Image: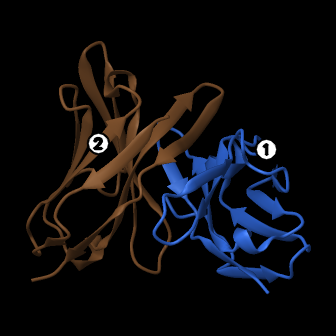
Chain colours: A brown, B blue
Amino acid sequence: QVQLQESGPGLVKPSETLSLSCSVSGDSVSHYFGSWIRQPPGKGLEWLGFIHYFVDSERPTYNPSLKSRITMSLDKSKNQMSLRLSSVTAEDTAFYYCARLRDANNMKYFDPWGQGTLVTVSS
Amino acid sequence: QSALTQPRSVSGSPGQSVTISCTGTYSDVGIYNFVSWYQHHPGRAPKLIIYDVTQRPSGVPDRFSGSKSGNTASLTISGLQAEDEADYSCCSYAGSSTYVFGTGTKVTVL
């Protein structure tokens, strides 16, 4: 059974970089489409992007609205995926979730998800 | 890439049916049969309940069903139960390896 768990600082100062990790158990990130999704308090979910390995190199795909600030990576040795979001503002305050993306010609969905972690941007 | 539109809330009594709409555009919901639905209880991991418009994962009760007409997808919960009270979000593939989520709907069991 695949399980995901997010971790990272719960408070980040404006203009700094938000960094989160997602530990994966029950599967290997080597053949994994890992995705990040966030939900600002009181608002809907927002897809941030996904990343996977292709021929031993990482292939990220980002939400165009965040492309200039976002970086995702995979760590095979730790079986983790990571998210970095630079130049944060209060609008980046949200619950951040990692999830496995099932992406194939005949199926596309996110399952399973981690429980999420709240990141607050404040000085 | 605008969020898909869902009603903010729907409610029903136990045993009744409720339907949640998810309206997008031709470029996402309209052209792709890759709409998924997620149930979200506060403090818990969101749970996949419908994928590819109508498919139900193993373990999801058959009172949950999905459909699509034009640019609008729908989730119907038949025989509403107390444990169905939660937030529900839709998601659609939007082409070029991108995805868009809905605005979210709170389901209240009266």
Q: Nearer the viewer, residue B93 or B77?
A: B77
For the residue labelled by badge 1, is the local secondary structure a helix, a strand or a loop? loop
Q: Residue furthest bottom?
A: B110
Q: Position of residue B66 (x, y in %)?
A: 80, 52
For the residue labelled by badge 2, is the local secondary structure a helix, a strand or a loop? strand
The C terminus of chain B, quarter of image: bottom right
Marked residue chain, label 1: B
Tag in front: 2 or 1: 2
Q: Nearer the viewer, residue A49 or A96?
A: A96
Q: Nearer the viewer, residue B69 or A85?
A: A85
Q: Position of residue A92 (x, y in %)?
A: 27, 70
Q: Which disc, if any, is residue A23?
A: 2
Q: Nearer the viewer, residue A63 or A83?
A: A83
Q: Is residue B13 above or below residue B99?
A: below
Q: Position of residue A53 (x, y in %)?
A: 31, 23
Q: Which disc, if any, is residue B54?
A: 1
Residue at 85 percent of width and 56 percent of height: B63
Left or right, B80 with respect to A43, comes to right
Q: Is residue B75 above or below residue A30?
A: below
Q: Amino acid at mark 2?
A: Ser
Q: Residues within 10 Å of mark 2 (few under 14, many from 20)?
A: some
Left or right, B97 with respect to B75, comes to left
Residue at 30 percent of width and 12 percent of height: A55
Q: Is residue B23 above or below residue A24?
A: below
Q: Position of residue A39 (x, y in %)?
A: 42, 67
Q: Is residue B55 above or below residue B108?
A: above
Marked residue chain, label 2: A
How far apart in space, not on screen, are marks 2 and 1 (Cα)? 31 Å
Q: Residues within 10 Å of mark 1 (few under 14, many from 20)?
A: many
Q: Amino acid at mark 1?
A: Thr
